[in-house]
Each structure stands twice: as structure tokens, then as C-alpha cells.
Image (cartoon, helix red, strand yellow):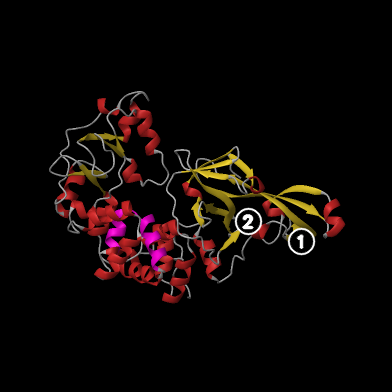
Amino acid sequence: MAAVTHRVFVSHLSGVPVFDPNGDQVGRVRDLVAMLRVGGRPPRILGLVVEVISRRRIFLPMTRVTGVESGQVITTGVVNMRRFEQRPTERLVLGEFLDRRVRLVDGHGQEGEEVTVLDVAIQQLPARRDWEIDKYFVRKGRGGALRRKGETLTVEWSAVSGFSLDEHGQGAENLVATFERLRPTDVANALHHLSPKRRAEVAAALDDDRLADVLEELPEDDQVEIIGKLAEERAADVLEAMDPDDAADLLSELPEEDKERLLELMRPDDAADVRRLLSYEERTAGGLMTTEPIVLRPDATVADALARVRQQDLSPALAAQVYVCRSPDETPTGKYLGTVHFQRLLRDPPFTLVSSIVDSDLVPLPPDTPLPLVTSYLAAYNMVSAPVVDESGSLLGAVTVDDVLDHLLPDDWRETDLTDLHGEEGIGRGGR
């Protein structure tokens, strides 16, 4: 098992305050949401159930948690206020794991003595925001006086029965647990080959961030089908979790009234980005770009740039360079000054200002640049991403090579089963 970077027992999290980056309290932790997995893997912690000031309970994904320390939880500040609804694939750790009667399991998988789960330890995986269950604190005995006097011990998660799924189960819960090990493009391939009913069941069971990643890899018809079967509030949440350019592409396939209704349900900032992208022709730089490249001010340092590049949620294409602009540093920005490539960041001392190493020679793309010229630009300059700048000199976004390829490949390119590269049968090819 990988080295543990951080471990905490869940009883210590119950009721602790949750703060945003500015130090303002968002609410308090009321539970943790876990997903059971197959293949001898420990349950994964998906997020926290947080009770906000209005006493509404909301879901806070662990990807939005930046710190769990000294009696408090720190978030990124991005909180979805939709009421928490537990899905069939989810388990509440405090509500369903604690006080549960289970059996110890020996190294050969044989069940032994019955114990009561008193506490659960979770660990954060190294260099990631992912958390999973690590250990159980249990008491031997069968309840009553014996329960109070029984021996207590801490055991590995695998030494306790009942916290993993059958490898060959056919329910949506098992499929979701199996898909958890796959890349989004492979999950998309598997979903594409399921029946519409099965596809809807699995989509409903996936968490918002995971479903957003998968939708981005699906053909347009599947995207429209899945988003149309979700409750409107959840559909809006999933669209918010998608990259703005992918969300715009999906919404452009919907009837006008459906598109407007979902945009109204989205957070205003997210909806504004998507509306801006929808205003451009599809096969132009403006229609292809993402509105969320890495933007830094001239007084930022190489160390600041590398910290941004290291963010795990970034695609390799977006992480390959940073764009230096005057304030404001959210698109559309102040005056665009130029680009600093990742290799240059590695060659200069951490205290170097990015403004002193900026590459201002390359002419940026206007938003109305047609797709063939965007393709030629990336190929001619060996770029994986290019800035899109308007007439006033403001950075609007960046076009990445993966988005260009999506529009150059045949419409049915997603039908290709990439697992065949390894001589294996595709995961979606079997029965439904």
C-alpha cells in the first residue's frame, strides 16, 4: 500500500466546522459519504455531508476539500447548495458503518469472531485529494455487558467483512464500483454499449464530477439522452462540473427552451462562461476554446506558476503553459502579455517573475479563426494549446489540441475500442 500522507478517525470529524478559504464558516460536518468497491479495494470516501447555516444538508466532494486539520475542514470555497440526496451506491460512514455488527476475516478469507465497529479511520492518498477507508476500530463481544467490557483493537479494513462488493455482481452499484478503476474515456465506451435503461441507471449512480468527466467523452447522442433523463437540478450540477466548452457543446444540441432552463439553474458565473462560448460559431477558435486556462499576473513567480501547473484536475494540454495577463486574471482578462511554457518554468529559479520570461512573439488567435487555421497554427508552432484573444487584447480562453482533434476525427471515432490495443476484449462488448 502507498505511504499514508494523512489519516483521521471519522468520530473526530463529526460536528467540526467547515470553512471557506477566507475563514468564513460554511457549516458543520454531519457525515461522510463512501462508495464500496470491488477487487479487494478499500471503500472510497466521496465527500462530506455538511449542514449549512439554514440547516440544509449538502454534499461537499472531497475534491473540494483542501485541508482536514485541528478540528476543522477547509474547502476551496466552491460549494453547491443543492440538498444532499443519498444514491443507491453510497454509504454513510457515521450513519451506517458505526455500531455495525461484522465479523473479523483471517488472511485466507475465512470469517471468524463477531465484532462491533466503533470508529473508522480514513487516509488521504499521497499527492492526491482522494481519500479511502484505512482501518476500523472494533470491540469484541456480542452486546450488552460484554460489549462494554470486550477487548478493543484497530484492524486493517480488509480484516473486516461486509465492506466490499461481489466482483461479479450485476447491479448498478457493482458497475459503478468497477468503473471507478477506469479512465473516463473507457467508462464512456462501456456506457455507450449498455442498453438505454442500464445506461441511465449507471449515470444516476455516478457522482456529479465523475459523470461530468464521462459525459465529455461520450458521443453527442448519448450525452443528450443521459442529461435528458436526469432531474433538472442535477443536470445543471453536472453541467457546472463539466469543462465550459464541453458543457456548451452539449447544451447546443438541446432544444432552445431546455437549454435556457438549464442555464438558469446553473450558478451565474458558470452559466456566463457557457453563454459566452455559445455565442461563437462551433468550428472556430472561440467555439472550441475553454474559458479556464491558467492565467497569472505579471508579478507572479515561477513558483506560483508551477503550483498552478501541478493541480491534478488540469488536463496535460492546459498544464503545458501559463498565460500572463494584467488584472483581472479571469477570462476575459486584462491585457494579454504572452505565454510561458512549462519547460521554461523548469529552467528558471522559483523566484523569477513570469513577466521576465514571457514569450510574446507568437501572435494569438482571434476568436473567429476557423478550425483549419487553428489546426495549422498548432501544427506549425508545435503547440498543444493556443491563446484566444479579442480585439481589445483580452485573453478569452485557450484552444487545446484534444478539442481540435474531437472536431477533426470522424463522427464515429468513439466507437473504436482502445482496449483492443492490448489484445483484450472491450469492456462494453459483452451482454447487457
- Residue 178 counted in the magenta span: no
Which amino acid type is marked by label 1? Glu
Q: Is residue 167 above or below residue 31?
A: below
Residue pointed to by mark 2: 93
Which amino acid type is marked by label 2? Val
Q: State the image coordinates of residue 18 (x, y, percent, origin top left).
A: 53, 45
Image point 46% across, 63% down: which residue?
424
In the rendered structure, are the residues bearing label 1 and label 2 in contact, judged by CB atoms less than 8 Å apart? Answer: no
Label 2: which secondary element:
helix
Q: Which residues are magenta?
A: 232-250
Q: State the image coordinates of residue 277 (x, y, percent, origin top left).
A: 23, 55
Q: State the image coordinates of residue 37 (x, y, percent, origin top left).
A: 58, 59
Q: Is disc 1 surrounded by few (<14), some (14 to 19) or many (20+) residues within 10 Å?
A: some
What is the number of callouts on the image? 2
Image point 48% across, 75% down: which residue?
431
Q: Horizontally, is 345 left or right of 103 in the view?
A: left
Q: Is disc 2 surrounded by few (<14), some (14 to 19) or many (20+) residues within 10 Å?
A: many
Q: Horizontally, is 356 left or right of 123 in the view?
A: left
- Residue 244 counted in the magenta span: yes
